[in-house]
Image (cartoon, grey):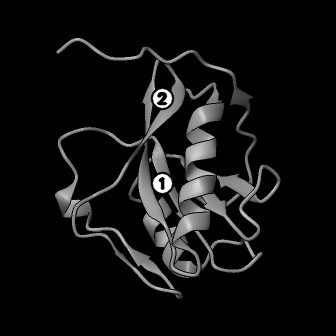
Amino acid sequence: MQIKGIARDTLNFILEASKSMAPQEFAGLLQEKDGIITEVLILPGTESSDSNAVLRLYMMPNIKAAGSVHSHPGPNRSPSQADLHLFSKTGNYHIIVGRPYNSQSWTCYNREGEIIELPVLDVEFDDYEEI
């Protein structure tokens, strides 16, 4: 799947959720629509602490994730071995957010843990979706 970027509102949600959870880690899975990351899926049973977050991947609905997102309680945004293990299971776009949880304190990695560019896009969201 080719990702064009992440919606600015989605990134802002990630930054605010990360800030509000601090010092505990925030974690979720990234969902895309038409090649743009527009949603964060919070899995039931996700556990957060000040040293890690545990995603229960078996709770994931039958959909494909574009990647993952989680925060670190400090400014270090480098992926740990546990992060790399998660990256290998959940898509190819992985965002790590660090303190101070602003527009400059996030990094996107591929599944190998290499930094990749993820453009921030201004996207109009529908107010509601028909079911």
The amino acid sitting under disc 2 is Met
Q: Residue at x 28, y 58 (%)?
A: 43
Q: In the rendered view, does 129 fall on the left or right side of 115? A: left
Whole-percent x and y of residue 84? 54, 69
Q: Residue at x 29, y 15 (%)?
A: 129
Res. 94 in view: no
Q: Secondary structure at mark 2?
A: loop
Amino acid at the residue labelled 1: Ser
Left or right: 113 as drawn, with respect to 29:
right
Label 2, residues with CA under 10 Å away: few <14, some 14-19, many ≥20: few
Vertical comparison of 39 with 61: above or below: above
Number of residues whose C-alpha sits closer than 10 Å to that of mark 1, classed few (under 14), some (14–19) or many (20 or more): many
In the displayed structure, would residue 128 be above or below residue 117? above
Which quadrant would residue 96 be assigned to in this image? bottom right
Please name the residue shown 52% across and 22% down the image.
35
Q: Is residue 108 visible?
A: yes
- Return the x and y of residue 83 as percentages of the image width and height: 53, 72
13 up-or-down from 8: above or below: below
Q: Is residue 58 left or right of residue 20?
A: left
Considering only order in the chain, which callout, 2 or 1, is on the residue closer to the N terminus? Answer: 2
**Which callout, 1 or 2, points to the residue nearer the camera?**
1
Residue pictured at 74% horizontal, 54% vertical: 115
User: Residue 87, which numbered label?
Assistant: none
Comparing 80 with 75, the one in front is: 75
Residue 55 occupies quadrant:
bottom left
Which residue does the numbered mark 2 point to in the structure image?
1
Question: For numbered disc 1, what is the local secondary structure?
Answer: strand
Q: CA distance from mark 1 to mark 2?
A: 15 Å
Residue 68's label in the rendered image is: 1
Q: Residue 38: x percent and y percent?
A: 49, 31
**Viewer-nearest residue: 86 or 10:** 10
